[in-house]
Image: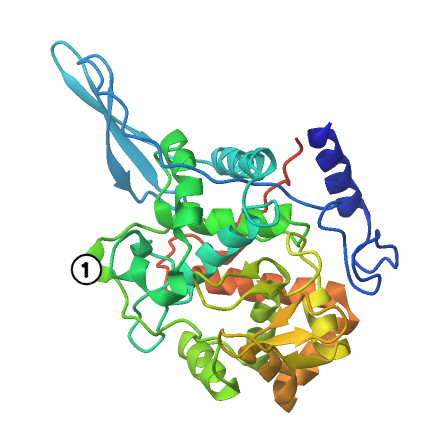
Amino acid sequence: MASAARSASRAFLRSTPATSAFRPAARSARYALSSQGFRTAARRGYASEAGSSKSSNGLLWAGVAAAGAAGAFFFFQSGDSSVTSKAFVPTQEDYQKVYDAIAKKLVDETDYDDGSYGPVLVRLAWHASGTYDKETGTGGSNGATMRFAPESDHGANAGLKHARDFLEPIKQQFPWITYSDLWTLAGSAAIQECGGPAIPWRPGRQDRDVAACTPDGRLPDASKDQRHVRDIFYRMGFNDQEIVALIGAHALGRAHTDRSGFDGPWDFSPTVFTNDFFKLLLDEKWQQRKWNGPVQFTDKTTKTLMMLPTDLAMIKDKEFRKHVERYAKDNDVFFKEFTDVYVKLLELGVPFTSKAEDRYVFKTFEA
C-alpha cells in the first residue's frame, strides 16, 4: 500500500506543471507540497563488508582507467594456465542502471529524516564539488577525497557519512564506477527523484588519494553575511545569479543540531524540490529564534521553519534579492537556471575528455 501511494504521488508530481496552482493540503496552503503526499523515499544505507575471496577461476577486479568519455574498467580472469585482461567501457545504458539502483534505494528506504535520503545525497554532491578553487585548480568533485580524514571530518561535512554509507552498496553493485562519478550522479538523481528538473550529467571523474584532500574553510559558513557568501562562491567562479540559484537547493532537507548546530527545515515540503524556499524568504516575516543555539531565524506564522543568516543575506543584498524575486515568481525559470548552475558545480575542475553536448539525461525511475 505504501509503495503504491508513493508511486501515485510521484506520478502526480511529474504530471503536474511546475506552475500549476494546484497544491495538495499541507501545513501552509500558500507554499507547501505535502511531504506526506510527495515524499520521495529513502533510508539509511550500510556499507557492505568485503566479500569473500574468489577461487582461481573467479574474477579479480583490478582497477579503473579512463577510456574516452565513459572510462574503462579493467579486470583480470585467472585461468589454470594464463591470465587475460578485459576492458569494460560503460555506456549511457550502464549509467542509467546505476541511476535506477540509486532511485530504487531512495524509494525503498524511508528511515532518514523526513522520509528520504534524497536531500543528503544532494548535499554530498554539493560539498564534494564546492571545494573547487579556480586559482589553484584544486578541489572539486574530481577525486572524492571526502572519503578520507581530515576532509571527512571538516565541520561543513558533518553528517555526510549517512550519504556515503547509503551509496556504498551501489558502489559494490557497480564496482566500475568511480566514487567521484557515483556521488555526483547520485546528487543529480536525487534532484530529479525529488520532483526537480532533469540534470544533464557526464562521467569522467577519477578518484584520488588522501594527498588531494582540500583544506578546511572552502565551503560556506552559514553564520556569515553576503560578503562571505561572495568570497566562497566567487572563488569557485560563480556570479551573483548563480549563487542565488544554487542556494535554492535549500528547498530540500533540514539542518541538524548535532551537525551544523542549526535546527529545522527551510520549508514545509523538505523532500520535494520547488521554489518555495524563495517564496518563503520574501513572504514570511523572519524573527531571530530565542534558543541556546547559534543565530538563526524562524517564521512568525508557524515557528516551525528556519532560515540561516546566509539565507537572509539573499534578500538583504539588492543584487541577490532581484534573483530571489525572479525565482519566487516563476518556478520554471528557477528550474532552468538551477539546472545550468548545478551542472556547472558538479563539473568544476574535472578534466573531461568528452564534450558538453555528450552529457546524459536520465529517465526518472518508475517503481
238 on left or right of 134 = right
63 on left or right of 234 = left
**At which x and y percent is residue 54?**
22, 17
Q: Nearer the viewer, residue 230 or 106?
A: 106
Quadrant that contains the N terminus: top right
The residue depicted at 36 percent of the width and 73 percent of the height is: 218
Q: Quadrant of residue 273?
A: bottom right
Disc 1 marks which residue? 211
The residue depicted at 45 percent of the width and 55 percent of the height is: 124
**At which x and y percent is residue 129?**
41, 62
Q: Nearer the viewer, residue 285 or 361?
A: 285
297 relative to 214, above or below? below
Three-letter code for the amino acid on which mark 1 is drawn:
Ala
Tell me if I can see residue 336 in this picture: yes
Q: Nearer the viewer, residue 184 or 152?
A: 152
Q: How many marks?
A: 1
**At which x and y percent is residue 24?**
84, 51
Q: Nearer the viewer, residue 243 or 269?
A: 269
29 on left or right of 287 = right
Q: Quadrant of residue 77?
A: top left
**At which x and y percent is residue 235?**
40, 79
263 relative to 221, above or below? above
